């Protein structure tokens, strides 16, 4: 049974796919991006080509190039590079899974197909199984994100007996706010040593209390260091400090959510904070507005989330 040498733990940054002003993928900055995550944020795991990475908006060749560059540049720097290989076409998904194995990625993850949808747990497992089988040496994660896929099959039900069908099944990336479902995934699988990665950054502390073993999220790109402080406080049973950290993070996320927050805004914020040009998103997404970026920047400053005031003011290319 394929198992990672080391379990995937702690924070995993859901990577942005950098793009040029003309909308082409810009893999030339990924080396710099790796160094930023490791050195400035202390984040050493990445989740590539997912929601934040606009994975479903890239073509197969672009997804492969991006994945390859993360593995290449992450060598000896990152602990784990997990590639999201979900697609509407089973064939595409299998191609990407096989490619992820060939390039030496540490795992693959798959969302439920979201146009013609699986209507029950068994059908979904059959789909996932066919993808997993294309990369029989790689740990497999199911990426549960019902709000975006529209596939609302409960994760807890999906996990029942899943390793009999998918021997490489390693865990779950749970991007939903249903903590009953999440808690029961953990509770019913205590013997399995599964990896439970939570994906709603503003609620991570609640999920840690429910048994999350790690977290994948967009905000760990630029709030990784801060979130690690929360994880450390939690591990030391200092719940009051952990809660203060979570509230501090929530103040920022709550602020941007009210302005309208998604992948485009994440690209703009990350360009601003890291100084690495992430570029605009691809259609159907639209660039974040200048107004959004100015407001987000002021909030980051007032919450003390910007290491150097105005250092990166030349990097607002992601805005209008
Ligand atoms: C829908 C979506 O993109 N979710 C991200 C990952 O699962 C999160 O990291 C959110 O961006 C974050 O929790 C802010 O709401
Ligand atoms: C946030 C997340 O996990 C993703 O971008 O896929």
Image (cartoon, rainbow, N blue to C red):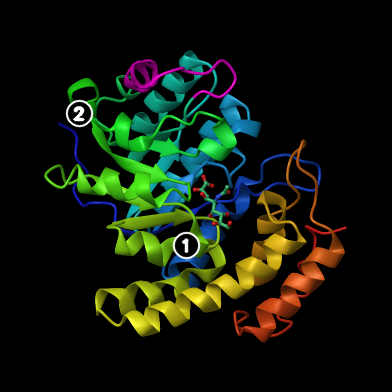
Residue 66 position by quadrant: top right
Q: Which residue is mark 2?
A: 163
Residue placed under numbered mark 1 in the picture = 203
Q: Considering only order in the chain, which callout, 2 or 1, is on the residue closer to the N terminus?
A: 2
Q: Residue at x 42, y 29 (%)?
A: 153
Q: Name the quadrant of the C terminus.
A: bottom right
Label 1 Cα crowd, 10 Å radius (few <14 / some 14-19 / many 20+): some
Name above or below for residue 59 compared with residue 42. above
Q: Provide the residue span drawn in magenta.
A: 113-131
Do the numbered discs 1 and 2 sit on residues whose CB atoms are within 8 Å? no
Residue plotted at (30% across, 58% down): 210
Q: Is mark 1 within 8 Å of ligand 1?
A: yes
Mark 1, mark 2: which one is toward the viewer? 1
* Rendering coords of residue 308 (x, y %): 64, 84
User: Could you tell me which secondary element the residue under label 1 belongs to?
Assistant: helix
CA–CA distance in space, label 1 to label 2: 28 Å
Nearer to me, 290 or 44? 290
């Amino acid at each position: 049974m394929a198992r990672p040498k080391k379990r995937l733990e702690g924070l995993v940054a859901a990577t942005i796919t950098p793009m040029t002003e003309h909308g082409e993928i810009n893999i030339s900055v990924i080396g710099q991006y790796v160094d930023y995550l490791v050195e400035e944020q202390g984040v050493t795991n990445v989740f590539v080509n997912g929601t934040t990475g606009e994975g479903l908006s890239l073509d197969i060749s672009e997804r492969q190039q991006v994945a390859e560059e993360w593995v290449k540049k992450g060598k000896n720097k990152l602990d784990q590079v997990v590639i999201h290989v979900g697609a509407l076409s089973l064939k595409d998904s299998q191609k990407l899974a096989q490619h992820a194995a060939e390039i030496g990625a540490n795992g693959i993850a798959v969302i439920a197909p979201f146009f013609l949808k699986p209507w029950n747990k068994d059908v979904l497992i059959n789909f996932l199984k066919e993808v997993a089988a294309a990369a029989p040496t790689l740990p497999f994660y199911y990426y549960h994100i019902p709000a975006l896929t529209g596939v609302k099959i409960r994760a807890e039900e999906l996990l029942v007996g899943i390793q009999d069908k998918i021997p490489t099944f390693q865990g779950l990336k749970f991007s939903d706010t249903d903590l009953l479902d999440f808690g029961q995934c953990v509770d019913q699988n205590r013997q399995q040593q599964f990896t439970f990665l939570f994906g709603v950054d503003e609620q991570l502390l609640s999920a840690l209390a429910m048994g999350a073993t790690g977290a994948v999220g967009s905000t760990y790109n630029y709030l990784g260091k801060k979130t690690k402080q929360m994880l450390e406080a939690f591990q030391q049973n200092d719940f009051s400090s952990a809660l203060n950290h979570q509230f501090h993070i929530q103040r920022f996320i709550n602020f941007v959510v009210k302005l309208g927050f998604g992948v485009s805004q994440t690209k703009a914020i990350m360009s601003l904070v890291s100084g690495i040009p992430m570029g605009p998103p691809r259609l159907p997404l639209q660039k974040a507005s200048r107004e959004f970026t100015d407001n987000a920047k002021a909030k980051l400053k007032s919450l003390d989330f910007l290491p150097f005031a105005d250092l990166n003011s030349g990097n607002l290319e992601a805005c209008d």
